[in-house]
Image (tube, helix red, strand yellow):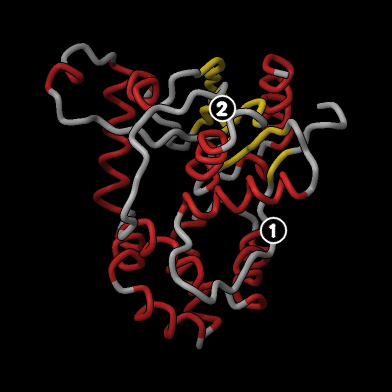
């Protein structure tokens, strides 16, 4: 990428001390930050929560965002039976993986979206509790040092409540955009992770120009498969610059 473009990243931001910080407000803050920094063209990259927020940056600032690269697009069936009529075996397998995740791994989001303070007081007061809470999602295939470093960042910055609060704010947001995004979009579908189903994603994102599928990488590809991840990001922005 040239000198007049930069990737939006998230660092130590918090603890959040007021309500209203949902995905759209965070995206507005990123766009405003890039304006104040003087960037006329920039790209946004995201994984996990960033895969939701970065497309919103593109939606809010299409005149300056050259493209958005993500590892997931969280677009789900609308309920129309016609959408399900001719799904391929691969798409059905992805839906099955999503169903498994919803049935076995989403209790964390339901709790944070409904009663964030109940969780906040517990894990903010206990390093062991915080480690156990995060460990259920980090999984067993990450190196202990990597997992401990991630959990430590929550502890030393006091941002556990901010994380739970974001789920609450998103669940209670008064406005959610419904029109498709239009900036160029790239997706790196990584093996072992939920990347989304393209036919549903194209309903919500009108300009998907690159969709790569890999047999490895997982949810933490920037750590587990950095060369693969970086090469896909670079290839996408080389196409849209």
Q: Are marks 1 and 2 in contact (CB under 8 Å)?
A: no
Question: What residue sits 63% from the left and 45% below the top?
Answer: 31
Which percent across, then down, holds residue 196?
A: 40, 30
Q: Secondary structure at mark 1?
A: loop
Q: Residues within 10 Å of mark 2 (few under 14, many from 20)?
A: many
Of the numbered discs in the image, which one, if any, rests on residue 11?
1
| Identity of the residue drawn at 21% across and 30% down | 78
Relative side of 38 to 64, left or right:
right
Left or right: 160, with 30 as reference point: left
Quadrant where the N terminus is found in the figure = top right
Q: How many marks?
A: 2
Q: Position of residue 92 (x, y in %)?
A: 27, 23
The structure residue drawn at horizontal position 18% and vertical position 20%, both measured from the top left corner, is 84
- Binning the other alpha carbons within 10 Å of mark 1 as few (below 14), some (14 to 19) or many (20 upward) gives few
Residue 151: image x %, image y %?
A: 60, 68
Q: Position of residue 73 (x, y in %)?
A: 44, 33
**Label 1 to label 2, Cα distance in Å?**
22 Å
Q: Earlier in the sequence, mark 1 or mark 2?
A: 1
Residue under numbered circle 2: 188
Q: Is residue 215 above or below residue 46?
A: above
Quadrant housing residue 112: bottom left
Q: Is residue 235 above or below residue 16?
A: above
Note whether 43 is above or below 88 in the view shown. below
Q: Determine the residue positioned at 16% across, 14% down.
A: 85
Q: Is residue 234 left or right of residue 92?
A: right
């Amino acid at each position: 990428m040239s000198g007049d473009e930069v990737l939006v990243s998230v660092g130590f931001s918090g603890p959040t001390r007021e309500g209203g910080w949902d995905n759209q407000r965070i995206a507005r803050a990123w766009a405003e930050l890039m304006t104040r920094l003087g960037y006329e063209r920039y790209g946004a990259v995201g994984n996990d929560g960033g895969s939701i927020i970065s497309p919103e940056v593109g939606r809010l600032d299409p005149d300056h965002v050259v493209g958005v690269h993500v590892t997931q697009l969280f677009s789900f069936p609308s309920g129309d039976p016609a959408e399900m009529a001719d799904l391929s075996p691969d798409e059905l397998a992805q839906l099955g993986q999503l169903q498994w995740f919803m049935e076995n791994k989403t209790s964390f989001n339901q709790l944070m979206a409904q009663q964030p303070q109940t969780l906040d007081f517990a894990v903010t007061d206990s390093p062991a509790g915080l480690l156990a809470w995060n460990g259920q999602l980090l999984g067993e295939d990450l190196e202990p040092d990597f997992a401990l470093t991630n959990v430590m960042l929550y502890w030393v910055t006091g941002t556990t409540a901010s994380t739970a609060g974001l789920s609450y704010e998103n669940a209670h947001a008064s406005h959610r955009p419904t029109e498709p995004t239009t900036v160029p979009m790239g997706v790196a579908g990584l093996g072992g992770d939920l990347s989304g189903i393209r036919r549903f994603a194209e309903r919500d994102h009108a300009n998907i120009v690159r969709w790569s599928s890999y047999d490895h990488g997982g949810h933490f590809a920037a750590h587990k498969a950095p060369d693969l991840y970086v090469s896909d990001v670079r290839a996408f922005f080389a196409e849209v610059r």
